[in-house]
């Protein structure tokens, strides 16, 4: 990315959140850009992690990345 290039906010089609971080690709179709949190949720779901544990993991990620 060029230094003077603006990062355009995007809206996640899964959760509706506005985000400016790099997108993740949905595992559902491999082409839809989704927010990083939804990408993490899809990855965790694919290995059998339940929703409650997914949220704990995301909370930990946010605490350590300042999000």
Image (cartoon, helix red, strand yellow):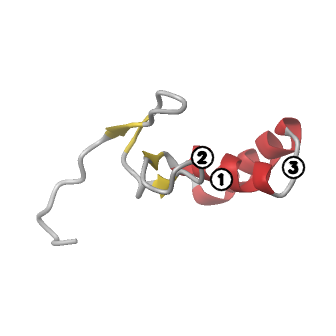
Residue at 14% x, 62% y is 5
- Identify the mark at residue 52; answer none if there is no mark: none
Q: Is the residue under label 1 in contact with that under label 2 (CB below 8 Å)?
A: yes
Q: Is the residue under label 2 in contact with that under label 3 (CB below 8 Å)?
A: no
Q: Position of residue 66 (x, y in %)?
A: 57, 53
- Identify the mark at residue 49; answer none if there is no mark: 3
Residue, far bottom: 2
Q: Is the residue under label 3 in contact with that under label 1 (CB below 8 Å)?
A: no
Residue at 53% x, 50% y is 26
Depth order, front residue of 63/39 = 39
Q: Position of residue 2 (x, y in %)?
A: 16, 72
- Identify the mark at residue 37; answer none if there is no mark: 2
Residue at 22% x, 71% y is 1
Residue, far front: 29
Mark before the other along the chain sequence, 1 or 3? 1
Horizontal side of residue 18 vs 47, given as left or right: left
Q: Secondary structure at mark 3?
A: loop
Q: Secondary structure at mark 2?
A: helix
Q: Secondary structure at mark 1?
A: helix
Dot 2: few (<14), some (14–19), or many (≥20) neighbours within 10 Å?
many
Q: Which residue is mark 1?
A: 40
Mark before the other along the chain sequence, 3 or 2? 2
Residue at 50% x, 57% y is 30
Mark 3 to mark 2: distance in Å?
A: 14 Å
Q: Position of residue 20 (x, y in %)?
A: 36, 47
């Amino acid at each position: 990315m060029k230094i003077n290039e603006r990062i355009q906010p995007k809206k996640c089609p899964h959760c509706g959140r506005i985000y400016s971080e790099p997108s993740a690709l949905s595992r559902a179709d491999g082409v839809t850009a989704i927010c990083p949190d939804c990408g993490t949720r899809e990855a965790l779901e694919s290995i059998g992690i339940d929703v409650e544990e997914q949220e704990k993991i995301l909370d930990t990620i946010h605490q350590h990345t300042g999000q």
